[in-house]
Amino acid sequence: MKSLVVEGFEVIDEGLAIDVKPRWLRVRCGGCGRRCSQYDRRAARRWRHLDFGGVQIWLRYAPRRGNCPGCGVRVEQLPWTCWSRSRYTTAFEDAVAFLTQRCDKSSVEQTMRMSWRSVGAVVERVVGRRHGEDRLAGLRHIGIDELSYRKGHRYITLVVDQDTGMPVWAADGKNAETLGAFFDELGPERCQLIKAVSIDMSQAYIKAVRSKVPHAQIVFDRFHVQKLVNEAVDETRREEWRRLRELDKDQAKSVKGLRWPLLKNTWNLTPAQSERLSTLQRDNKRLYRAYLLKQSFAAILDRRQPNVVTRMLQDWCGWAARSRLPAFVKVARTIRKHLDDIVAYIRWRLTNGLVEGINGKARVLTRRAYGFHSPQALIAMIMLCCTNIWIAPPRVRLAK
């Protein structure tokens, strides 16, 4: 450990306490690092360091406070820790973060002999220290989605850079005010650089994007758009089953078992499911009409010409409105309302796949930690494990 002088040691109940002091004589401000005059000296404190041979090591020192012209009265800069209020050395915190990237927090707690909450606090400090560069710089295409991290409708809003595939911002909540705080932090100049925003069909996110970055193109995620049509097919199937059950229970059995054949892609159908669908036009025309609407909608979104897709979607909405299927009539109104944002997928080819992938990793982190009690702890874990933060394992060479 550089810039440190050992003055003595003492065997204590917890392990070994080593008396140390900084190598420099004059006080250095803990905020800016400038040399300044000494203000006073505080009581002796201890900082937990990496264990040696199973023995806990503590660094002990009475820190001074300096009277800095720019920062005021601040605790002096210490070579073994980056934050004066921390009770751990920087090497110890890096070792905790290295283990937390690779195993659950309970195992880190037992290995490093510290509390579960202290592991989370260390992770937050390491993430803040390692993210020295501005993560919000150079954003052009972003994806936004919410993540549920606890029961009782507890969510965080996650913003991902579509160009790098890494999360850049997260906060507690999933309303328009939460997302508006992101654009406020981004600033008006960098907001002007945003070209496209991929989101699901959340009205809160739409409101925030339209008010904060009205020039940016909203791109609705294809999965969520196609999900509306699939839900309409499933709702039509349930309505048919209820209608036929009132007429004839034996006839209602013909609709049973059609849920997955109706929702699957054609190349994923089994031979038995393909045979069921081949007789659907004869057995139930309403369900067959819903199936054709679903298949044609997916084929339209597979095309690459925006003008052609716009015209075909308008024709599709007219067909769905005349289908006499209530679920599809409702979907047709929604698609007409957001037609430009749906067609934007054809132009930009942006989806929320990256955001959903990070959400999946975050859910694994949540299970690995057996739940998070605060959004800040989860956000710190996401930034630690899902970004390009690289932490080397603790290795020290005694001889060079």
Image (tube, rainbow, N blue to C red):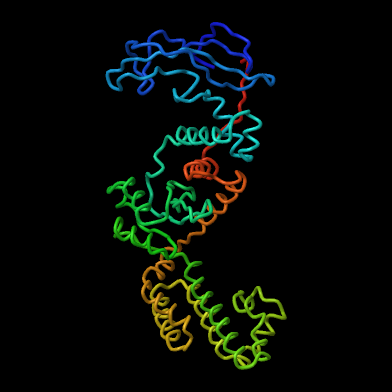
In this view, the residue in front, 267 or 376, is: 376
Q: Please, is residue 105 above or below residue 249 in the view? A: above
Asked whether, in this view, residue 17 is left or right of residue 137, the answer is right
In the rendered image, the quadrant that contains the N terminus is: top right
- Residue 178, x across and y down, in percent: 37, 52
**Outermost residue, right side:** 272
Please state the horizontal and vertical placement of residue 347, each as a whole percent of the image: 41, 66
Farthest residue toward the top?
7
Residue closer to the observer: 324 or 226:
324
The picture places residue 50, in percent across and down from the top left corner, at 60, 22
Q: Is residue 377 placed above or below 142 in the rendered structure?
A: above
Which residue occupies 65% across, 32% down? Answer: 110
Residue in the image at 51% along x and 9% along y: 5
Which residue lies at the image location 35% right of the left edge and 22% below the top edge? 32
Number of numbered discs overlaid on the protein picture = 0
Asked if residue 363 lies left or right of residue 303, the reply is right
How far from the left and from the top, in percent, is residue 13? 64, 15
Rendered-image quadrant of the C terminus: top right
At a point 61% along the width and 48% down the height, the residue shown is 367
